[in-house]
């Protein structure tokens, strides 16, 4: 498995280096007024750093990440998260942002997280209303209202 980590991380280091090189030819702009090359450059740099970290970790004597996931039943959790995100995307327009985010957070906290059941409703409500407040009210991002029109 370590060999696969080394190969894949090396591949992504090459892809990220190409991304950084090509985005450096675009106008970078400033942090206050970013240009066309700003985001691709930052993504390329982050991708390179993460690939480098994986490459260095692949030489350690610890177990690989995939082996750890399979050993601890992590595959089921990953599939549950993937399924919940797919359902979130499918029903977001129909049921609305607040309700779907509340349901997603509740599911993730109950099924995946290790949160007491008494806190699940509170944390789900705070996270969905908090995200709504940040995106809709503060940043003026248009969010789906759904069938309940809120």
Image: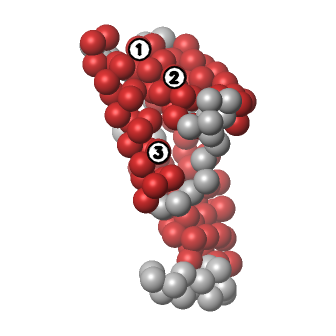
Give the labeled residue for mark 2. Answer: 103
Locate residue 111 relative to residue 121 in the image: left or right: right
Q: Residues within 10 Å of mark 2 (few under 14, many from 20)?
A: some
Which mark lies nearer to you, 1 or 2? Answer: 2
Dot label at residue 132: 3
Question: Do the residues bearing badges 2 and 3 touch, measured as CB atoms within 8 Å?
Answer: no
Give the labeled residue for mark 1. Answer: 110
Q: Nearer the viewer, residue 124 or 57?
A: 124
> Colour scheme in the image?
secondary structure
Q: Disc 1 or 2, which lies upstream in sequence?
A: 2
At 34% from the left edge and 19% from the top edge, which residue is drawn? 120
Residue 5: image location, x then y, percent: 55, 40
Q: CA distance from mark 1 to mark 2?
A: 10 Å
At 48% from the left edge and 27% from the top edge, which residue is drawn? 102
Locate residue 28 relative to residue 116 in the image: left or right: right
Quadrant housing residue 39: bottom right
At 44% from the left edge and 35% from the top edge, which residue is drawn? 128
At 41% from the left edge and 14% from the top edge, which residue is drawn? 110
Residue 38: image location, x then y, percent: 56, 77
Residue 1: image location, x then y, percent: 55, 30
Q: Nearer the viewer, residue 112 or 58?
A: 112
């Amino acid at each position: 498995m370590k060999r696969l980590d080394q190969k894949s991380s090396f591949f992504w280091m090459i892809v990220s280096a190409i991304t950084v090189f090509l985005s450096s030819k675009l106008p970078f702009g400033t942090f206050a007024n970013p240009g066309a090359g700003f985001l691709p450059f930052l993504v390329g740099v982050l991708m390179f750093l993460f690939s480098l970290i994986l490459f260095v970790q692949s030489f350690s004597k610890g177990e690989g990440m995939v082996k750890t996931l399979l050993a601890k039943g992590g595959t089921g959790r990953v599939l549950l998260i993937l399924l919940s995100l797919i359902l979130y995307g499918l029903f977001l327009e129909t049921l609305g942002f607040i309700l779907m985010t509340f349901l997603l957070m509740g599911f993730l906290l109950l099924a995946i997280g290790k949160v007491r059941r008494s806190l699940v409703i509170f944390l789900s409500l705070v996270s969905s209303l908090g995200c709504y407040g940040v995106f809709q009210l503060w940043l003026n991002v248009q969010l789906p209202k759904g069938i309940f029109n809120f």
